Amino acid sequence: MPVDLLATTAAALAAHANGWFGVEKGAGVAAKVHRAAVLTGEFDPEAMGLGHAASARWRSEATLALPQVTAERREPADHGDVVKRLLQFADGAAVESVALPMGHGRLSLCVSTQVGCARACTFCETGRLGLVRNLTAGEITAQVTLQCRERRPDSIVFMGMGEPLDNLPGLLEALAVLTDRNGLGYAQERLTICTVGHVPGIAALRALGWKRLGLALSLNSADEARRAELMPNSVRYPLAEIQAALVAFRQRKNLALGVHWCLLPGVNDGERDAAQLAEFVRPLGRTFVHVIPYNPGTAPIARAPSEDEIVQWVARLRAHGLAVRRRITKGRSVMAACGQLGAARPPGVTS
């Protein structure tokens, strides 16, 4: 089977090339092939001065497949456009990625790790699809490569379609490519993985020994019964086990863990909710609670919270001593906001 250039580190590709061509001829070209593949999505051995026979060998041994951008929608934001792309792979499966302007000239890319999702969270559009399949490491990396063609993102968040730790092999391979200094070269602190609380997956991330890798928990309720209602397929691990896994994950004292809270008016915004959240967070060390106002999808379970409701919830959490960051809503009008990714053609797009 040909080597997927977007799923391979520079060192691994050099090792393959040494086997194909010999040490003297393989490694140097491999470095150029790798950088062109991951940074620009190009695979053109002839352009690197290779002869017909060598180029043909490269094309038989390696492959690069970028998804087709079948739709793109933009929403103006304070610091630039939110850009949502619908990406279709060769088998017809589709996912969405979202480029988010973050202020101070920074850009974050929200990438998907699965086509659909098995977790069935009631507030999430992706959860309505069910799981279709995992993305390969190359398909995950391809979302970054495509964005690099327009502008390199400063940070990458694995918060798009799917539960990243349900696709652990693909995720880990993609992380290796993304952090490869000879290619995309992302620092660990520029990557953040969001999970519903996959305890073995969190342990696997810790085993990497990466002390600066970002991790966030999608919590939404610190009450077992209520969380089961909101996230029916995300409760295989009790909150106490998830809490312990987060404590164990920290390998650097000042690492800031994230706890995401989708704010649903009348559902998880009461004083009891705040007290339970504070109790859950207390043992975790340095933690930021990210309040994400609910973004209704095609089958809403609540309305979007009002500005007053958001302010009151943030104040309630701070009264409990929690460090809180309010997520500014971006992309809601083009179904690109948190919880709205469903790999459906955006409204108004006909081609």
Image: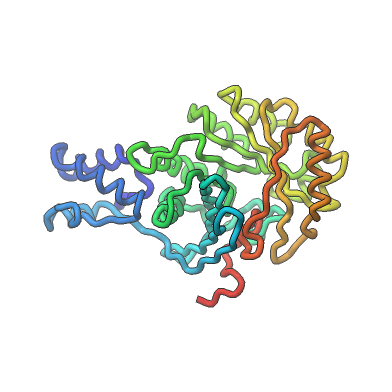
Q: Measured from the top left, where is residue 25 in percent x and y?
A: 14, 42
Looking at the picture, does residue 187 appear above or below residue 301?
A: above
What is the tally of numbered marks visible in this picture? 0
Q: How is the image coloured?
A: rainbow
Q: Measured from the top left, where is residue 318 in percent x and y?
A: 79, 35
Q: Measured from the top left, where is residue 39 in percent x and y?
A: 35, 49
- Quarter-of-image position of residue 177: top left
Q: Nearer the viewer, residue 295 or 117?
A: 295
- Quarter-of-image position of residue 157: top right
The residue lying furthest to the bottom in this view is 350
Residue at 42%, 42% in the rendered image: 178
Q: Is residue 19 visible?
A: no
The residue lying furthest to the right in this view is 271
Q: Is residue 276 visible?
A: yes
Q: Measured from the top left, where is residue 185 in percent x and y?
A: 39, 39
The residue lying furthest to the top in this view is 253
Residue at 16%, 37% in the rendered image: 23
Q: Nearer the viewer, residue 82 or 258?
A: 82
Looking at the picture, does residue 21 appear above or below residue 306?
A: above
Residue at 18%, 57% in the rendered image: 46
